[in-house]
Image (cartoon, rainbow, N blue to C red):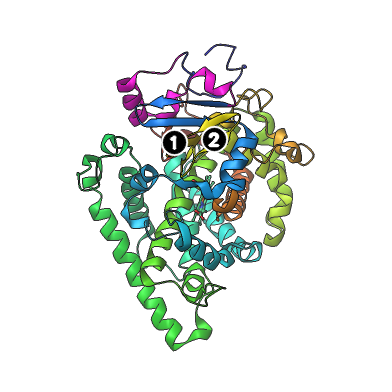
Amino acid sequence: MTELFFEPPSPPAPMPLDAPLGPIGTLRVLRKNPIETWTKAHFELPILIGPTILGTIAVINDPAAIRRVFVENAGNYRKDALQKRILGQGLSEGLLEAEGDDWRMQRRTLAPLFTPKTVNSFSRAFAAAAAEHVARWGRMREGRMIDVRPEMGRVTLDVLGRTIFSDGLGQDLDQFVAATSDYFASVGRLDIFDLLDFPDWVPRWGKIGNRDGEKFFASVVDTIVAKRKRLLASDKETVPRDILTLLLEAQDPQTGSGLSDTEVRANILTFIAAGHETTANALTWSLFLLSLSEEWRQRLAAEADAVLPGPVEEYPARLVETRAVIEEAMRLYPPVASMSRQAIGPDDLAGKRIRKNSLVIVSQWVLHRHRLLWDKPNSFDPRRFLPGAREKIDRFSYLPFGAGPRVCIGASFSLQEASIILAYIMRSFSLELKENHVVKPVQRITLRPDGGLPMILRRR
Ligand code: HEM
């Protein structure tokens, strides 16, 4: 790492390349770790456009051009086929993958599930999952080594279990956690056949094993949905007001029609797929970055002491520094490290012509560390996100949750959830990175520490 790119002390990141790789090298690195394909020029220029092995690609880092793609001219850009292939069949009828009128109908119908009022009504579930998680760690011996990544996956899945199916998964949490992680680990790997746009009927080796995972999910979810429908039909008064009930009752405000069974199931899978690993990684990176900063560990512990266990409704407004750390962690290690769109027709972005069918990429990994947009871009400094400084960040320079009509529907859900979980952890524990462990970020749908994050559990 040279001083040119990484002002010391900077948390780990691959050194950008001096020049782009050749076609074979690009494919190899894309499969291994896409964030290693970026060159220094990507971190310095507002737009780079050119032919690649995957067709013409424009990588944009200019906030005005990003606003044009995601908001002003959003109708000219659609989600590309590659993204859909990576995420798999199970989600194809859900909000994340829907397009056109189908997407508009689903977004209108699902919006009430994620209003601030509904999300606030979940705070209790967030706090209960966090308290149970911390109690579990409390039963472990002092100095024990834990892998923080699956631990955070466990707690965020528990939150989704409590908020989607509040009367229980009807399954052992450990079994569900194991099946989820197997399923999404294989779904999330870039397949060379996907990259080269081979037709869908060509088998993808990495995905052959995950059919069992897909079937397991479908069967658990179908059983729960059928049970809830019976309850809704027989005794409406006692039905829990969780996401499942809201999904079954949801109506399109324009037409009054509800979601089909397939759409209900696809959206449950979508919420788990989109909300589980992403939030778990935001928490994992926050804990890693906190292990590097005595100052911020102390600040968060003090904030947690002051706020918990007060009234749950006040947590979101009062966990200000905790939230700043999570936002800074998502800047340096964005759980969703890139987004892509295909241009339906030509356009002009940042002074360059975009041709029909070009792929437009906005990489949060690059954007959030871009030298034209951030001061000391590679340093960990949560002050950027404290009130007073936060408002000065351009809306289109910081996109952990995307932007425009397709912005993450679960953004405030996950920010509240993550703040509450982190505060519970910081109130009771201080985590140290295992000595000599080398942390390496790797992009596999979500951005995670390669090989997990071994840390030593210390009580405060
Ligand atoms: C830290 C946590 C999370 C991050 C970083 C994240 C990030 C994102 C991003 C970047 C997008 C836009 C993708 C694009 O435009 O190509 C997105 C969309 C979406 N997210 Fe999240 N997400 C998180 C948590 C959640 C949660 C908790 C849920 C649900 C419970 C969720 C559900 C969705 C859905 C359904 C979409 C598609 C929205 C649409 O196309 O209308 N996400 N998310």
Q: State which quarter of the image contains the C terminus.
A: top right
- Is 117 positioned to the left or the right of 163 in the image? right
Q: Name above or below for residue 86 compared with residue 328.
A: below
Tell me: is circle 2 under 8 Å from ligand 1: yes
Q: Position of residue 299 (x, y in %)?
A: 71, 37
For the record, the magenta segment spans 19-46
Please report the residue visible at 47 percent of the width from the left and 65 percent of the height from the top: 164
Q: Nearer the viewer, mark 1 or mark 2?
A: 1
Could one spot residue 450 in this view of the protein?
no
Q: Report if residue 38 lies within the magenta region.
A: yes
Q: Residue 212 is drawn in which quadrant? A: bottom left
Q: Amino acid at mark 2?
A: Gln
Contact between marks 1 and 2 (CB within 8 A): the answer is: no
Residue 358's mark? Answer: 1
270 inside magenta stretch:
no
Q: Amino acid at mark 1?
A: Ser
As drawn, 222 above or below 299? below
In the rendering, which numbered label is found on residue 364? 2
Please indicate whether residue 398 sits to the left or right of residue 135 in the image.
right
Furthest residue in direction right, as rendered: 388
Give percent across and percent down for residue 208.
21, 46
> What residue is rendered at 47% in x and 35% in y?
355
Q: Is residue 39 visible?
A: yes
Q: Residues within 10 Å of mark 1 (few under 14, many from 20)?
A: many
